[in-house]
Image (tube, rainbow, N blue to C red):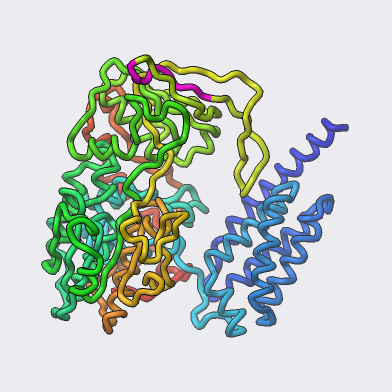
Amino acid sequence: MHSKNVIHTNEVNEKVTKFLDKYVKRVKACPPGVCPISVQLSFLESARTQTCGKCVPCRDGLEQVENMMRQILDGKADMETFDNMVALAHMIQDTADCAIGYEAANIVLQSVELFHDEYMSHIKEHRCQAEIGQKVPCISYCPANVDIPGYIALIGEHRYADAINLIRHDNPFPTSCAFICEHPCEEKCRRDLLDSPVNIRGLKKFAVDQIAADQVKVPECNVSTGKKIAIVGGGPSGLTTAYFLSLMGHKVVVFEEREALGGMLRYGIPNYRLPKDRLDEDINAILSTGNIEVRYNTCVSRDVTMEELLEEYNAVYIAIGAQVGKRVSIEGVNSNGVFNAVDMLGEIGRGNIPDYTGKRVIVVGGGNVAMDCARSAIRCNAAEVTVIYRRRQIDMTALPTEIQGAIEEGVELLTLNAPVSIKADENGNVKAFVAQPQIISVYKNGQPSVTQANKDTIEIPCEIVLLAIGQDIVSAPFEKYGVNPRRKTFETEPDTRIKGYAKVFAGGDCVFGPATVIKAIAAGKIAALNIDEHLGYHHKYNENIEIPIAKENDRTHYGRVHLTDRSARERKKNFEPIENGMSYDEAMQECNKCLRCDHFGCGVVEGGRA
């Protein structure tokens, strides 16, 4: 009986997968002029007819979600209906027995995220938005809302400087993001309906490889306003805010605790991933606006107080990031040879390369920082490097390309093992790492949890342990300025203003916790706009770049052009850049794959173009 049920379930899932592959992809391409909620409703109706009726979440839950969505579409719902629909979709996603239930619920949840404004319009205004139309997916999934179809078209016309300036309209770090952005824009690229997503990051890298960003003149600043803004922190968020405020005509002073700008771009990402001379191209361009002064080696609370900043400046933006690493509370963590990953990478960023010749290195963690540490340790001549992670490889938060690159360079992954203790010799030097095997367990919040396996602990000989288990925020010097004592993050209003303070703003990792560079950049851009409004202005910084007229789409199926790396046997010997760029032919092929969703009725560019 059990085997028959398994066979039946597999057959159902195979059938469902074919249905979803055919239908869901079509649903994601909402036709112009059609309310996206009505499209989602049509999908739900179709999905419900496919249910076998054996599980309650799918059989009854989808019908209830459908009814609530119909009320929203008809303008007869309130926020309680919306909240109930979302909660029920989450429940179906977590408890349905097959893909019909949980994938249908997942599509509803995606629609709520992508078309949130449309849902709110139906609930509050009882009608569709004035301009119905799905957003251009790549733009809407870019946290900074960069005009991606526009700059791809410019690259296709060989107008590389214009492409860089169009990127800088929303993101003043085109070079840095060309190297290390996690490119969420590619996740929903509609080209995937035909063959594969456009390699957007690769095209950005091609553009900045043709002409350095600091050789492309930035837009002219507006006339001086006479206003002064202090920015605490010279990382991606702080410098983004400085760039846009400078273009608006405000005077900006950046207070940077370290000896150079860049934050974690300089002190957290190794040179082989982001060459520091290429980072400097972005920073040079930002500073070239002319309204930015930088005070290096200046720590707010030590060298200057917040009270002094509030007295002297018209606004203060706190963008201190998450600059220190967390420590794990296990026995032996204070032994000689135990280092924090963030500190180790910071020293490498300063040019102080540690010598691990002949040493065995353990890296604890599964994120990009852990991979950076492991691959850096290889380049520091370590004899062995082992990454220990308490979950599975598939659960690691590091980019798959980073994990694969580490493995190619000789890093061993020891997954499903949790740290227990660090053993030291009589002199206090690390001699071994003790780990407890884990077993994969029940799903919680969409991810399988782990529990301790009924197995003996294992002991791995080593001399160096690098802890890469997360980053922390040093917000104690600002604790009276709306800091959450538990999370150490700043509590802000929707306009990025710190609660209770009229002219103190905050953004980036110190508000939402450690995240990606592009999210920090997006936070800086929003903060600049909010500070400008606070000062009584509504500046625009239009570049007046003419976007090429869209060509007829090429629907020929192409394989995706992937960026390649230098061979592992060569690249692991030094910190030189590892990634190869696109050739001209490859770049032009990827440009021609863009379907120009901004032009052919598939979406609109929010706010229009410059």
Residue 172 position (above or below residue 332):
below
In the orientation shown, which residue stands out farthest toward the front?
A: 426
User: Quarter-wise, where is residue 155 in the image?
Assistant: bottom left
**Residue name at image x 68 percent, y 71 percent:** 69
In the orientation shown, which residue stands out farthest toward the right?
A: 1
Of 353 and 160, which appears nearest the observer? 353
Image position of 410 (left or right of 35) = left
Q: Is residue 433 magenta?
A: yes
Whether residue 66 is visible to the viewer of this picture, yes or no, is yes
Whether residue 212 is visible to the viewer of this picture, yes or no, is no
Expressed as whole percent of the image width and height from the top left, the position of residue 202 reads 32, 47
Expressed as whole percent of the image width and height from the top left, the position of residue 299 reads 21, 55
Image position of 154 (left or right of 335) = left
Of 197 and 115, which appears nearest the observer? 115
**Residue name at image x 38 percent, y 15 percent:** 425
Span shown in magenta? 427-435
Indicate the quadrant containing the C terminus: top left, top right, bottom left or bottom right.
bottom left
